[in-house]
């Protein structure tokens, strides 16, 4: 059994300087010039307009690759943890076996069918040298080259087994064992308590976890400055930030 299983969202990394996904300055709130985030952050866009997709992805995500873990990440470092965040800060804080259920910013995968088995590889973003402050067209060329996407005819098109793709679960993709979904569900089934920190309950993984918690009748905690109220009796709400909660728990230990 697992005494406590923590499931974290963007609120945990907010104090590290990473915008939450659905806040006023969030990644999903701010789109590109021509597309909404729900249109841009898709496998369809990667396949059909890889230059714009990679430029958006790089500017929204990769530009935050140098941020540091905060108090919450360090407190969670020895906990059983499933995170929705792709920033990798839990690993940098010392957690050796957390599940990054939506992927990792510092990893890429080969462009293959979603159900194909493969292991993520290091992204090595430092290959994209921004010292010269390139314009968008130059940056697109750098990104297409890095992700091994070549022009076929008059169109840049990813090639199966050759081109690379960010190791991130996109809006039109499904959870697979590439993202350790079977292991994550097993942890949920073994947990005596599930604690949600900094999540808006707007993604599937929180729905899966909550459904399993309700079916088993286990205790649930929700930690957020503006916690979502759920129709389940066995819930404790903590109206506070992730750091405040972790400091409170640490003071009681």
Image: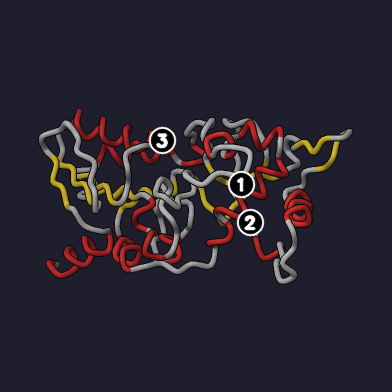
Q: Are marks 3 and 2 in contact (CB under 8 Å)?
A: no
Q: Position of residue 3 (x, y in %)?
A: 20, 49
Residue found at the far top of this picture: 215
Mark 3–mark 2 distance (CA, rounded to whole Å): 25 Å
What SS does tag 2 mark? loop
Q: Are marks 2 and 1 in contact (CB under 8 Å)?
A: yes
Mark 1–mark 3 distance (CA, rounded to whole Å): 21 Å
Residue located 69% across and 34% down the image: 47
Count of marks, rendered view: 3
Residue located 58% across and 61% down the image: 63
Residue linked to disc 3: 182
Residue linked to disc 1: 166
Residue linked to disc 2: 123
Residue found at the far right of this picture: 153
- The image quadrant where one finds the N terminus is top left
Residue located 24% across and 41% down the image: 228
In front of the other: label 1 or label 3?
1
- The image quadrant where one finds the C terminus is bottom left
Quarter holding residue 246: bottom left
Q: Are marks 1 and 3 in contact (CB under 8 Å)?
A: no
């Amino acid at each position: 059994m697992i005494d406590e299983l923590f499931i974290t969202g963007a609120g945990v990394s907010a104090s590290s300087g990473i915008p939450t996904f659905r806040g006023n300055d969030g990644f999903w709130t701010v789109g590109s010039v021509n597309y909404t985030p729900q249109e841009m952050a898709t496998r369809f866009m990667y396949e059909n307009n890889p230059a714009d997709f990679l430029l958006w992805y790089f500017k929204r995500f990769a530009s935050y690759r140098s941020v540091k873990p905060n108090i919450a990440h360090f407190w969670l470092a020895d906990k059983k943890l499933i995170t929705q965040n792709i920033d990798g800060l839990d690993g940098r804080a010392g957690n050796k076996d957390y599940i990054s259920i939506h992927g990792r910013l510092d990893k890429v995968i080969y462009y293959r069918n979603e159900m194909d088995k493969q292991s993520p590889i290091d992204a090595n973003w430092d290959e994209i040298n921004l010292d010269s402050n390139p314009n968008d067209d130059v940056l697109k060329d750098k990104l297409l080259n890095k992700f091994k996407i070549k022009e076929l005819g008059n169109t840049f098109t990813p090639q199966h087994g050759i081109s690379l793709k960010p190791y991130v679960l996109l809006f039109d993709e499904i959870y697979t064992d590439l993202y350790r979904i079977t292991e994550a569900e097993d942890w949920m089934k073994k947990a005596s308590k599930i604690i949600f920190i900094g999540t808006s309950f707007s993604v599937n993984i929180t729905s899966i976890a909550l459904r399993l918690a309700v079916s088993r009748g286990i205790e649930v905690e929700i930690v957020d400055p503006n916690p979502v109220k759920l129709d389940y009796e066995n819930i404790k709400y903590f109206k506070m930030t992730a750091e405040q909660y972790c400091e409170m728990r640490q003071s009681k230990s």
